[in-house]
Structures are given as C-alpha cells and as structure tokens.
Amino acid sequence: MAEEPRGAWFGFGFCGFGQAPGSGRGRQVRSPEPLHVGVDIRRVSASWSYTAFVTRGGRLELSGSTSGAAGSCRDAWASEGLLVVLRAGPGSGALLQAWAPGSALRGEPLWAQDVVPEAEGEGDPGGEAQAGRLPLLPSARAYVSPRPPFYRPLAPELRVRQLELGAEHALLLDAVGQVFSWGGGRHGQLGHGTLEAELEPRPLEALQGLAMAEVAAGGWHSVCVSETGDIYIWGWNESGQLALPTRSLAEDGETVAREATGLNADGSQVKRMAGAEDGAPAPFIAVQPFPALLDLPLGSDAIKASCGSRHTAVVTRTGDLYTWGWGKYGQLGHEDTSSWDRPRRVDYFVDKQLQVKAITCGPWNTYVYAVEKGKS
C-alpha cells in the first residue's frame, strides 16, 4: 500500500498562551496558519491553555501555558486537569502515564499503568494524521477521565471503537456503529430526549438502525457522522454550534419585545421572539435533546467531525472544511471573529488548493491537517 502523502498542520483560534507555535502569543488567529513545528506532527490534542503535539518519530512536545517534551510516545491527550501520555512499553505493550500539566513531564507521574494492546491493529483509516485513540485505551476496555478515578473500566460487552469526552458527558461508538452516551445531560447533550443525567452508557434510540462512523463531543453538544456521510447533531445551541437558529446571533443588538418558551413535538426547546418577517414569532433552538439531521451546503457528504467548547467543524468527502458556532477568537477560520449558526466553508484551504484530511478542535481553537490536492 502506498504511503499517505505528507501534508502540514494548520492552527487558528485562541492563542492567548502561545499554544499554536508560530502564531504569536496573546492574539487571535483568525485564519489558518501553518504550525511552525513542521510537517512531522502525527497527532494533536488541544486543551484550553496548552496543546500536545506527537511527532511521527514518537516525540511529545507541549506548547502554551506549559512546556515540556518526552520521547517514545505513541499518543497524548490534553486536558486542563490532566495530561495523559501513552508510551511504548516492553514488548508490544504500552505504558500509560498521567501527569499534572504544570509538571512539564518532569519528576514522577501522578500514576502509571501497563496497558495490554489487545485491540492493536484497528488503527484509524487514512494513516498517521488521524486523531489518537486516547482517551480510549488500546485495550478498548477502559478509558481515561480528567477527574478521579482517572482510570474507568467499560462493560466487557461493549466492543468500543471510539470514545470522546465533553465537559460533562461521554460518547461511545461501538464496533457495529451504535452510539452510546452518559454523564451530565442538562443541555440535552446525551441525545435521549431529556435533560436528565445517565450514570451508565445508554444507546441512542433515535439512531437505532443507522450505522455511525464517527462521534465527536463538544463542551455541551454532540455530533456523529454516519457511514453514508450524514451528520446528526444535538445538545446546547447557545452559540449556533448545532447549526440551528439561535437567539444570541439573530438578535444582533435588536430589542426583543416578547418571548415565549416551549418544546417542539420532537422535544427540542424553542424560544420564540417577535419580529419575524411574516409577522409570526421566529423559532430559535436553545436546546436540541434529540439527534437532528444536518445538511451541509451542496449536499456534501461528511467523513470527519470535531467539536470545541461551542463550535463545530466537519470535513467532507472532497476534503472541504466547514465550521460554525462560536467564533470570538477566530476558531472558525473565516478571517473574522463572527459566530455562525449555519455551516460555512473555510475558503483558505480551497484557495490554497489543499485537501483537509483531519480535524482536531480545542475548546477555543482548531487544528487541521491538509495535503495538496491531487496528491491524496
């Protein structure tokens, strides 16, 4: 099999701690910029104040509010409370280490554990540019949490393919494409039609019979991509991150004379405001507790998705990148700080004749891996 052509990583959005190398400290990066750590980056994991980069040679480098480096690294997962590193262990095994981010990888880790890579070989399609498996462990029987207990087992009957963590909830994709969710649900991010929490993984009944290929967890919203390229999205829509009409963007400084709150037939929470063009109240979605089907412009098929705190990014089959939601720090990549409640293509990659291959959102920023068109 031919080796995947190497491209480059780009970053944009919040850079207040210098976490995107080469983008400058203390300013917004409103359009994609190449990362100056070079084309050697294999994986990126971004927290709010720092970013972890894993190179193809197995070197881990931290950039932002903390710095540091380590070798023999297979993967890393960054959060504000915990930095998790998967390092090469004896034989075919691996060593899992958890560090306080401020330790800069010096001294002793908070804890360490040997991991038997039972699921080795189920790597991501598309090569080394894909997101890492953490916080799901290679054994696929446990995952890492930023809050104690840090190591959390999964039920043995769950054949896990992907696991993603939001601010208060978790999404799990099993081997047959079924989606499970659990954790906090006060913003509808679990997708079960209520705002209640779930203590154990519960399958999404609304997606039964639909095979999913990927899941992504935002701060308080969720996205999944089906094997046929459809996007389903649910949870909190405060900044338009669901690509549904939201009051905060529609008002745009206008005075709201009247407001009523209720639930749609599908359970979505709606706020209606006076001032629609036809004289009728205009609907705005605050919370969408059921998965909603989202169509991209031009009927594009999605293949990858990632979520920030309040923004969403999707890669299409043709290598285009669409972003929407909160854009205060330029994390949408549209050369401004506007927020959007509908998908908008990032023209930078089109103009540069680049095809997007991978996407990783931090809470307030975005990282993209792209190759030249015609070389994929």
Image (tube, rainbow, N blue to C red):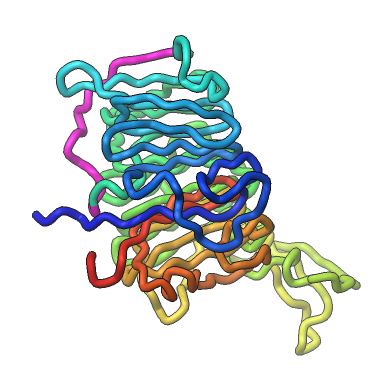
Assign the C terminus to one quadrant of the image: bottom left
Furthest residue in direction bottom, as rendered = 278
Q: Position of residue 194 (x, y in %)?
A: 59, 49
Q: Nearer the viewer, residue 226 or 37?
A: 37
Q: Position of residue 62 (x, y in %)?
A: 48, 33
Q: Position of residue 301 (x, y in %)?
A: 36, 71
Q: Is residue 44 magenta?
A: no
Res. 142 visible in picture = yes
Furthest residue in direction left, as rendered = 1
User: Secondary structure of the magenta portion, mostly?
Assistant: loop
Res. 267 visible in picture = no
Tell me what residue is drawn at x 49 percent, y 60 percent: 313
Quarter of the rendering containing residue 331:
bottom right
Q: Position of residue 321 (x, y in %)?
A: 44, 66
Q: Nearer the viewer, residue 271 or 98?
A: 98
Q: Is residue 116 magenta?
A: yes
Tell me what residue is drawn at x 67 percent, y 63 percent: 337
Assign the N terminus to one quadrant of the image: bottom left
Horizontal side, residue 129 vs residue 104: left or right:
left
Q: Nearer the viewer, residue 372 or 149?
A: 372
Horizontal side, residue 376 vs residue 338: left or right:
left
Question: Is residue 256 shown above or below 147?
Answer: below
Tell me what residue is drawn at x 54 percent, y 55 percent: 12
Question: Is residue 210 shown above or below 300?
Answer: above
In the image, the segment drawn in magenta is 111-126
Question: Is residue 93 shown above or below 222?
Answer: above
Tell me what residue is drawn at x 50 percent, y 69 percent: 346
Tell how many labels.
Answer: 0
Q: Nearer the viewer, residue 181 or 3?
A: 3
Quarter of the rendering containing residue 245:
bottom right
